[in-house]
Amino acid sequence: MIKLNFIVSLSTLKRSRLDKILVQHIPLVSRSCIQKWILLGYVSVNNTIITIPKKKIFLNDYISVNVKKNLQFIEIKKENIFLDIIFQDSAILILNKPPNLVVHLGYGHTSGTLLNALIFHYKKNRMLPRAGIVHRLDRNTSGLLVVARTIFAYHYMIRLFQQRKVIKEYDAIVIGRIECDGIINYPIRRNIYNRTMMAIGIGGKQAITYYKIITIFRNYTHVRIRIETGRMHQIRVHFSSIFHPVLGDHLYSRGIRPNVTSYSKLEYKTLIRFYRPALHSSMLQFVHPITFKLQTWTVSPPMDMIHLLHVLYSEDMK
């Protein structure tokens, strides 16, 4: 049985929805799991059972959680998964996430995640909300990710992301030839037909993507991307919307493919074997939470993208 009772304080009230406040107090349980608890009647506010996850909470409200024993609950396992650490100090760590590593626990992912690795290598992170993870990358997106190591650094970094003071750059290979630099400014919301996908649409949240051409190949373009906002699947949705989906992105490709008759045998084999979106988080820049100095971290793409770029270069030289 899981029991929790607390009075809402000013620091907690920054997230005024019931489900979001509970995530702060039970950081190693996913929000979707907490929402199920609420819907099942295991949460009360001021001694009244509440079944609305988005119910507004006020200062000094008394919240009680009483989860019955037979409710499925995931015990968070610590796992010795290798982490490629680019930088670390007492406040933060910057890591280079490989492709095919899930960041958070979720449906179908109760182990083998970055969170499992963090609580193995950094035991004190177990006490932080979401083990110190302040933003995410999609499972098959590689590259830089910042993790907080103290509660002060956690709230500091969350605030920087909310205020859009973290500069993030990505490298991507997209289908088709883009002839000039540009900006994509379309709102993004949940896909009404498939809740696991995002879509461009009225009523969505503002999303702004800047891109710069690095190399134009015969059938593809290597672009460097800077996002002003951080919506779920933002880069993938935005480039799909301009009919240049990210190479390897089967979810948002919309059936767009270059003319296969123009492929060489080597290029065709390389593309067929490239199993993930060709997207890599290559740069992070923000003011450090202790030194308050502007710092920048960069990392090259992983070998699969480097090999892909090499093949595209070599084929275009023929």
Image: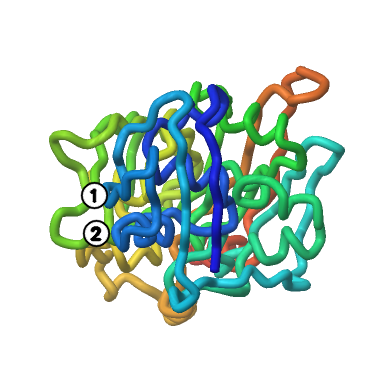
Residue sitting nearer the eye, 180 or 290: 290
Q: Position of residue 159 (x, y in %)?
A: 56, 26
Q: Disc 2 designates what residue? A: 195
**Do the residues under discs 1 and 2 have CB atoms within 8 angstroms?**
yes
Of residues 50 and 305, the one drawn nearer to the viewer in this rendering: 50
N-terminal label among 1 and 2: 1
The quarter of the picture where residue 40 lies is bottom left
Mark 1 Cα-neighbour bin, 10 Å: few <14, some 14–19, many ≥20: some
On screen, 114 above or below 216? Answer: below
Q: Position of residue 25 (x, y in %)?
A: 57, 45
Could you tell me how many numbered marks the image carries? 2
Q: Foreground residue, 58 or 140?
A: 58
Mark 1–mark 2 Cα distance, whole angstroms, equals: 6 Å
For disc 2, the neighbor class at 10 Å (few under 14, some 14 to 19, many from 20) is few
**Amino acid type at mark 2:** Arg
Question: Which quarter of the image is occupied by the N terminus?
Answer: bottom right
